[in-house]
Amino acid sequence: MPPRLDGKIALVTGAGRGIGRSISLALADAGAQVVVCARTVRQIEEVEQEIIQAGGKAILIPADISDEKDVNLLFEKIDTTFNKLDIIVNNAGTGIFKEVVDFPIGDFDQVMSVNLRGTFLCCQRAMRAMIPNKNGYIINIASVAGFRGYPRQSAYCASKHGIMGITKALSIEAQKHNIRVSAILPGSVDTELIAYARPDIEKVDLIRPEDIALTVIFMLSLSDHVAVDQIYIRRRNSDPF
């Protein structure tokens, strides 16, 4: 049985599609009130309605997490509406894939701004919201690219390595506040991004977004006696370890 998250307030960034959508649906199914956040309003409207029609609770708050003003407004709205935040899943991300020699610095900055700066800003504001209650869970969606390198993915790998750096440092800072911080590092997941980054992988072999959602639920199901630092999930037919 999945854990019951009744009364919990959960924020999911990049919630409009793919992994973020699946995580949002799973959290709502477990009883959480889900704040679905992304830049594209139409997509999070659809996720919000999907949750509500299934009997769950959700509100949408559009935001560009790379923009500090947007992030501040996002968390101010959460505080005004709920006066707390129990769970955040930092899932929003982007990727541009070219060899280093041909990589425009503007594209590099864009990837780092969304993936790394955005995750940092959301972690910072989530901590400020969770510290007064001495409780909370921050889950960062990293990637296998957070500990491996891949051709044409220099900026993406740098950003995901950076997310792991944030996660590792923040987990130590958060421990004294009874706040858990973890990372999920998926291999290739069936999303629009992977279709662009790894067209060589057959769709049938890809991890499903629902698998990542189940991993989030697993982390949240654990007792207060344990903590998980990271979970790496690979495609079943990829090389072990």
Image (cartoon, grey):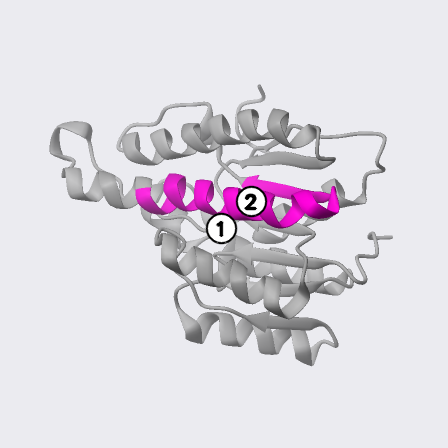
Which residue corresponds to mark 1? 190
Q: How many marks?
A: 2
Q: Is residue 99 visible?
A: yes
Magenta stretch secondary structure, dominant: helix
145 or 223, nearer to the observer = 223
Separation of marks 2 and 1 at Cα, in angstroms? 6 Å
Residues under numbered marks 2 and 1 in contact, where contact means CB atoms less than 8 Å apart: yes
Disc number for residue 207? 2
**Segment tinted magenta in the rendering:** 113-140
Of residues 89 and 94, the one nearer the viewer is: 89
Label 2 or label 1, whichever comes before in sequence order: 1
- Where is residue 163 shown, x and y percent of the image? 46, 33
Q: Would residue 37 be counted in the magenta stretch?
A: no
Q: Residue at x 75, y 30 (%)?
A: 227
Q: Nearer the viewer, residue 82 or 19?
A: 82
Residue 194 horizontal/vertical position (percent): 40, 46
The correct choice, above or below, for 67 with respect to 33 in the image is above
Residue at coordinates 65% horizontally, 28% vertically from top-left? 229
Residue at the image position 41 percent from the left and 48 percent from the top: 93
Residue 235, compared with residue 16, is above or below; it is: above
Residue 143 left/right relative to 31:
left
The residue tagged with tag 2: helix, strand or loop? loop
